[in-house]
Amino acid sequence: MLLTEIHHDFMQLPNGIRLAYRAWMPTNAEQQPVPAILEYLPYRKNDGTIVRDELTMPATAKHGYACIRVDIGGTGESKGLFDDE
C-alpha cells in the first residue's frame, strides 16, 4: 500500500491556536476516508519519539489507518501556552 507522509503542517483550533502535526496515511485517504489514530502528548513530534514514530506510524498506515502525531499547544512547534503535564 502506498503512503503519504506530511512531515509538518498545522491545524487551527476554534480559539485560533495552531497546533503542529505530523501524519502518515494511505495515499487514497483524502478520497476514501480511513480510521485515524491520534497521538497527543507533551513530547515533541520531532524529538524523543521520532525514531519510534518513523517505524510504527508508517507500518500502521500500511494497514489502512491514518496516524497523526500532534504537538500539544505550547510544546514543540505548536503555538499556545503549556502550563502543566
Image (cartoon, rainbow, N blue to C red):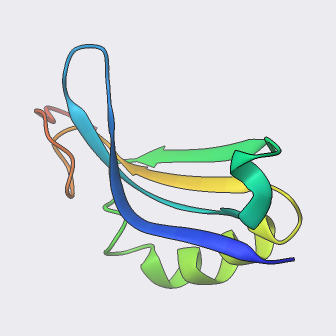
Q: How many marks?
A: 0
Extreme residue toward the front, this view: 31
| The C terminus: image quadrant | top left
Quadrant that contains the N terminus: bottom right
Residue 68: x and y in percent read 55, 53
Q: Residue at x 22, y 14 (%)?
A: 15
Give percent across and percent down for residue 55.
Answer: 65, 83
Task: From this view, report whether residue 31 is shown above or below residue 65.
Answer: above
Rendering coords of residue 16 (x, y %):
19, 21
Q: Quadrant of residue 72?
A: top left
14 sits to left or right of 56: left
Q: Is residue 18 left or right of residue 1?
A: left
User: Vertical placement of 18 versus 75: above or below?
Assistant: above
Residue drawn at (42%, 48%) of the image: 41
Find the residue positioned furthest to the top. 15
Taking depth in this image into account, of 6 and 22 the one nearest to the observer is: 6
Question: Is 16 placed left or right of 21 in the picture?
Answer: left
Q: Looking at this view, is 13 or 75 the one in front? A: 13
Task: Judge left or right: residue 51 versus residue 76.
Answer: right
- Give the image location of residue 9, x and y in percent: 34, 55
